Image (cartoon, grey):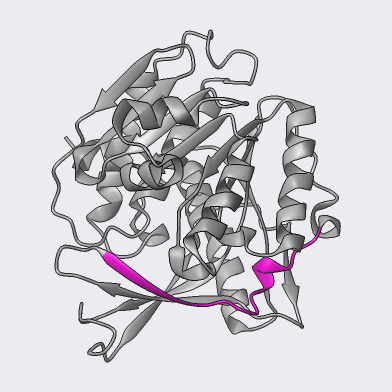
């Protein structure tokens, strides 16, 4: 069976128990997080074999994260632990509407210093998928490692997925982040962006922004619109849209990752490859609709990984 490989950050999300600002929050709860890891878990919950590629600290936080992914059914054989670097930490503040603010502690994060040697045993096959984001692209060594894996994936005929997942406070300035994201966007067959991210990356809005994204390898663009659903654009001009689903939102953490993980899982499950993505007769509108359901379902629970559902739970809860 085809497999999803995701590379990137694996961190502890400290979630506030009292929904207050950082200044006023008194207690936090530990949760496993990291966008590509969330994507991996959601795909696994939908029946896809997945593996996570990263490095954490040789500490209790790292042990907890590895154990969490293993318990979710993710292959953790490519996660190593470092004596030199730390496990990434993120503190999250929630508004009453469930929106988030992040403060990161990852200047000496192990997931910024993984190397090609850490993943030399990863072998892709046609029909596999590789997914990555921008948070773990802060260092040259990590960027080179991403390029190494992307090159292996492409040579094997695996689909390459990219979610920029912009975190401006992790970079020296916005232009540095934009430059890095653009460099890595050219490798992707499929990209997921939020409406605001799309405008930032292109300097345009609406249809002009969408047109500006296509070029290079890009075949499919997903644009998420928060509670208003999502849109899908193909390089041959076809498109689809979903208006989204109204649910009782508790916490938006991981909603976009759940959306993307679901979409990737559906493509893998349908036998999508680089060769047949555009002419394989896939029902992209249906895939988009279910991905929106998964994202909406995740917002009705607290946290990311712990909030994600399998197909039965999602279909039963989101109408």
Residue 46 in view of the camera: no
Q: Quadrant of residue 192?
A: top left
Q: In this view, does 171 lie to the left or right of 258?
A: right
For the record, the magenta segment spans 100-115
x 57%, y 65%: residue:
10
- Is 287 situated above or below 254? above
Residue 83 spot, x, y in % from top left: 76, 82
- Is 77 situated above or below 3? below
Residue 271 in view of the camera: yes
Relative depth, front residue between 263 and 230: 230
- Is 286 situated above or below 124? above
Task: For the N terminus, give its image quadrant.
Answer: top right
Q: In which quarter of the image is residue 84?
A: bottom right
Relative depth, front residue between 196 and 71: 196
Residue 214 spot, x, y in % from top left: 51, 26
Residue 126 spot, x, y in % from top left: 72, 25
């Amino acid at each position: 069976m085809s497999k999803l490989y995701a590379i990137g950050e694996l961190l502890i999300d400290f979630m506030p128990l009292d929904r207050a600002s950082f200044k006023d929050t008194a207690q936090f709860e530990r949760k496993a997080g990291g966008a590509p890891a969330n994507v991996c878990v959601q795909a696994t919950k939908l029946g896809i074999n997945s593996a996570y590629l990263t490095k954490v600290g040789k500490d209790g936080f790292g042990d907890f994260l590895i154990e969490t992914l293993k318990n979710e059914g993710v292959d953790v054989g490519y996660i190593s632990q470092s004596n030199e670097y730390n496990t990434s930490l993120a503190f999250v503040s929630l508004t009453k509407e469930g929106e988030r603010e992040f403060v990161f502690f990852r200047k000496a994060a192990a997931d910024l210093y993984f190397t090609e040697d850490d993943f030399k045993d990863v072998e892709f096959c046609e029909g596999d998928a590789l997914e990555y984001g921008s948070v773990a692209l802060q260092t040259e060594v990590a960027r080179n490692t991403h390029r190494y894996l992307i090159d292996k994936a492409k040579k094997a005929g695996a689909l390459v997925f990219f979610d920029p997942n912009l975190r401006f406070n992790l970079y020296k300035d916005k232009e540095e982040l934009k430059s890095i994201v653009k460099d890595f966007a050219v490798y992707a067959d499929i990209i997921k962006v939020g409406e605001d991210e799309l405008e930032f990356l292109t300097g345009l809005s609406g249809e002009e922004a969408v047109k500006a994204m296509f070029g290079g390898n890009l075949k499919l663009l997903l644009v998420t619109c928060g509670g208003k659903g999502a849109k899908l654009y193909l390089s041959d001009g076809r498109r689809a849209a979903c208006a989204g689903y109204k649910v009782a939102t508790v916490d938006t953490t991981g909603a976009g990752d759940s959306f993307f993980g679901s979409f990737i899982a559906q493509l893998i499950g349908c036998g999508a490859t680089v060769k047949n993505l555009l002419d394989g007769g896939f029902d992209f509108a249906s895939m988009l609709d279910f991905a929106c359901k998964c994202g909406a379902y995740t917002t009705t629970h607290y946290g990311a990984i712990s909030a994600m559902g399998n197909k039965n739970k999602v279909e039963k809860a989101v109408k």
